[in-house]
Amino acid sequence: MSKLLFSAATAAVFCASAASAQTDGAARRAELLRQRAAIDAELATLDSAAPPPRPARPAAVSADAGQEILVTGKALSLTTRVSGQTVTTVDAALFRNTPATTIADIVRLSPGVAVTQGNGPRDVSVSVRGSNARNGFGARNLQVFEDDFPVTQPDGLARFDLTDPHAYGAVDVVRGPSSARYGNYALGGAINFRTRSGREIDGVEAGFDVGGDGFANLYATIGQGNADRDVAVFGSYVRGDGATGHTGYETGTLNALARFELGSRDRVAVKLIYNEGEFRLSTRLSYNQYLANPYQQGCRTAAGAAPGCGTISVLVNGVNGTRIAQTAGEGDLARNDRRTIVGTRYEHDLGPNTTWRTQATFDSRVVNQPTSATPFKGTLDSYNLTSDVTHHGRIAGMAATSFLGIFYNYLDNQSFSFNKTPAGRNGFGALTQTVFGDVRNLGVRAREELQLTGRLQLIGGIGAERSILDMRQTAYTYPVGGDPVLSLIPANRHFTNVAPEAALFWQAMDAVRLHARVGTGYGIPQAGNLFVTAAGVAGNNASLKAQRNTGVDLGAEVALGSTFKAELTGYTEWFSNELVSQSAGVNLLAYTSNVPHSVHRGIELGMHWQPLPGVKLDASYSYNDQYYTDFQERLTVGAVSRVLDRNGKAIPGVIPHFVNVRAGYDQPAGPLRGLGGFAELSHRDRFFVDNSNLLAMPAATLVNLNLHYDPPRGSGPLSRLSFYAAVQNLFDVTYVGSASVIANSLAGTGVENPVSVLANTTGAVYAGQPRTVYAGVKARF
């Protein structure tokens, strides 16, 4: 580890201890002097090997970044200041004076990231290098953290609608296969959301945002911190009516982090996230329905519905027999979910160079989702335990950071599916499926960061994990005029995965840093994948295999002072048994299959440039070229079955080109310091939604405008207030907010159905947000 990071970490511990020494007497002072002598001796040994500081990230590190050392002490951080990988940090300065209605407003500023609308007004689907492009909600194939506490449950699912972006001070986006560091499901990398520290808040901040379609967000943050303790508590209440019919929502969030120095060698952090939300949902549409009625207006009832209204098919008695059509409003489709995450982290310095860290997290997800013709209820409680040791020392005369850790996580799954009746949100009919069981992951990780020369660093790591997926599905069918039929499908799957990685970082010159990396990732099937057949109904799909990928990154970072920073990375990843999900239709469940081999490759570019004082240009670009290299898909209709060769076809759902450019000005000095604004352009390329590459969603280019006044503290009578006004989607472009991957099909003759049939396949499309005006005010006390 570099002298810069080591000295900062040890100095932070020393200073925290020194602050309390004023009351501890002469004995305490002598102990501190002894520690300082040990630190000075260690620093002296690092002088000859310490490299120059690495170039800054393309996005500025947060104003509170120096204090983050107090959070992690001398232990190796999971996601902050990661060495050996492609990482971008998005600072709060880029989103502090924006509506930030969802986390999409944050993470889309990073290269390698594409965002689409998820399953509901606040839900966002985040894809890193295409990792989650085929999932209609939340995040799969990606590990998500908040303040280094896990937010991804052991079944591989993370949701992005449980927190408010106003709580965050920075976001770290780690890209590339990362299972050596993060374990199961880290095929695309990791994202860490960092809340603001109490020291940065230093009092109370309260804000109120309003916008079109009934949007309102009332939020407040309370924080205080010093060398011994730091506490920050955030809370918000958000509601909106939604531009699309039947998409109103209300949600409340509590988010807190407390950190305490228990002495010169001990630190504790405690984390709490609580969110409860009530979300009304529209149905996903066929492409032709979207073209006819993108925002689902005039869809109160199926009998009087306007052209293009989406409907579901509901059993009249909730058991079997006759079905009737209902719109989303008639059926009152909704989600009422509750999420509670509580975690604690304890660090103890075993010596001046060795730190032991133990972390425990409890994560409860309670869901009530009458979102379709098959409502879902469940309780998914999980437990995540990690313990590791970090040692800063020397190997063969070279400065080295050594890491060894063990981990265990467990998920208790209890879920139920029902037939829907015509009786609205609470119209739960006969039970159709239960899934009971658990997911367990146990493993070990090791890592070595070795300073070969003053400018060359070698990093190696490995992770090994044993996963047990023990689930039991009971499926219920109700033949008309017959007795109910119960079908039991057990799935007891054991997986052993090993993930090595290696990287070289070369400080070619003070302003340029180059890196080369080979990483691996893996992800076992989720419980829900095992019990849905290709027909989109409950059944046996329990033979799915774990997916794996091996990726190579080549990249460069350039920093010319603070005025120009850029990063460029190229990557290629080879997947085997990639898990691909497809929609079988609006009244059916999505199903998953393995693709034997596929290739993901691309380019990522990020830039921050300040050509003149106050003038800023920020840009990110992502190119994803992902295609099948070995995939034979079997389609069946009636007694006719046919195998279709998908080799060379683009993987559906993956957006090839994603661009975000922001040009702005902020008055750097004088009485109007903090007054500014920006214009932003976001472009998303067309992308396919089926394996045959017949149906593509069109490209979209959006323009946003922003004006704000955010003066520094103590700069005048208005320094306690900040204001902004923004227009999102200035030119009111109608665009596809998201589109689920849909299954191809055969005609009765065995010929594959053309694009005209796919365009009428329901269960795919949500429209994006039309032109919307927002304004907000924030006060500091």
Image (tube, rainbow, N blue to C red):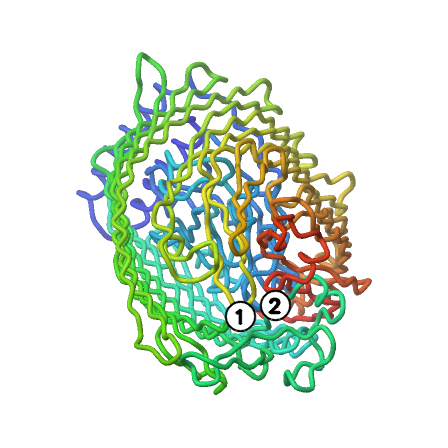
Between 558 and 654, the one nearer to me in the picture = 654
Task: Name above or below for residue 5 compared with residue 429.
Answer: above
Task: Name above or below for residue 269 compared with residue 330.
Answer: above
CB within 8 Å, label 2 to label 1? yes
Residue, x 50% and y 46% (percent of image)?
580
Task: Name above or below for residue 519 compared with residue 89.
Answer: above
Q: Residues within 10 Å of mark 1 (few under 14, many from 20)?
A: few
Residue kind at label 2, given as amino acid type:
Arg
**Element type at marker 2?**
loop
- Percent coordinates x, y for residue 420 in the rendering: 45, 78
- Percent coordinates x, y for residue 740 in the rendering: 59, 56
Per the image, the residue denoted by label 1 is: 781
Q: Quadrant of residue 208?
A: bottom right
Could you tell me how many numbered marks the image carries?
2
Q: Is residue 240 left or right of residue 266?
A: right
- Percent coordinates x, y for residue 59 in the rendering: 61, 42
Residue 672 visible in this rendered orientation of the protein: yes
Residue, x 48% and y 80% (percent of image)?
315
Give the Cα separation between the discs numbered 2 and 1.
Answer: 7 Å
Residue, x 60% and y 36% (percent of image)?
627
Between 623 and 459, the one nearer to me in the picture = 623
Q: Residue furthest right?
A: 731
Residue kind at label 1, given as amino acid type:
Phe
Location of the N terminus by quadrant is top left
**Element type at marker 1?**
loop
Between 300 and 512, the one nearer to me in the picture = 300
Per the image, the residue denoted by label 2 is: 720
Q: Earlier in the sequence, mark 2 or mark 1?
A: 2
Between 273 and 323, the one nearer to me in the picture = 323
